[in-house]
Image (tube, grey):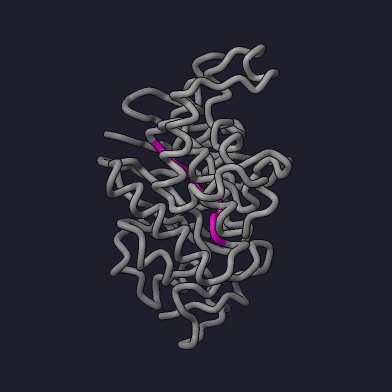
Amino acid sequence: MLISAEGVTKIFNGKTAVDNATFAVDRPMMIGVIGRSGAGKSTLLRMMNRMTDATSGRMLFEGRDILALNGADKRAWQSQCAMIFQQFNLVPRLDVVSNVLHGLLNRRSTLATMFNIWSADDIGRAIAILERLGIAEQAMKRAEALSGGQQQRVAIARALMQDPKVILADEPIASLDPMNAQVVMDSLRRIHEDDGRTVVANLHTLDTARRYCDRVIGMRAGRIVFDGTPDLLTTAAAREIYGADASFSEAATSTSIEPADQEYAKTLLHT
């Protein structure tokens, strides 16, 4: 089994954010995690990456419990499990290629990091990844000069620089316009297909999950209430995930994006 979650739970100040999450992934695939704001999606990904600790349960990757790792073993896992964020988390004043090279920070000495020393091989690899994502011509520009969609592709390139086995994307298109959202999702899908990497992405709309994902996990109030293929995302399944008060609209498209902090009762869902 590639990934196996067994009763993973996270409690913050007496409130259960993730409640007994259990699922298994037997091969690399692209997985979408959907649900209302506050459903526990981001917390689940942060536990997988070990940005936050679980209260209880186990999360096995290739048979090893990653929730039990500490010190150097934990850092090694984080280098194998790259994280992409909604707000890109780039260094705005640094050029693009330097931001991509920061994907190697966990593997470098403190001295090399302080003086921003990179090998020719590392720089060449970073530019090759940017070329793959269609933004190599931006390599020497400051990150802050790029559009949101370009910045998110730089963040993806930084993740690829780690050569990870798993890529976790926490609301990767929530801040983007529809065209850039499609470019970013196309990039993540190609990475999964071409590299055989597992990609797990928190997503806003059912259409995005249907279009790009092999499997969808739906969360509600911290619990997994749906786990299946996109074709099983019926209206009834959507209401189980989002609640009976969710607002549905036939006008919603696969690139309709709402801000991350809005209630999903206001989200337009295409059914």
At x 28% / y 46%, what residue is drawn? 194
Instruction: Determine the residue positioned at 46% across, 79% down.
Output: 253
Residue 262: where, in percent of width, then height?
A: 67, 68
- Near-viewer residue (50 or 145): 145
Whether 188 is drawn above or below 44: the answer is: below
Q: Seen in the image, is 51 located left or right of residue 49?
A: right
Query: Residue 80's image quarter?
Result: top left
Q: Would residue 215 be found to the left or right of residue 266 on screen?
A: left
The C terminus, quarter of image: bottom left
Residue for point 49% across, 29% down: 123
146 horizontally vs 137: left or right: right
Q: Which residues are magenta?
A: 166-173
Give percent across and percent down for residue 183.
Answer: 45, 62
Viewer can see residue 38:
yes
Q: Position of residue 30 (x, y in %)?
A: 35, 51
Q: Is residue 236 magenta?
A: no
Callout count: 0
- Front-lying residue, 78 or 269: 78
Horizontal and vertical percent for residue 153? 51, 51
Prevailing secondary structure of the magenta residues: strand
Which residue lies at the image location 35% right of the left edge and 59% below the top edge? Answer: 213
Which residue is at the front of the view, 152 or 249?
152
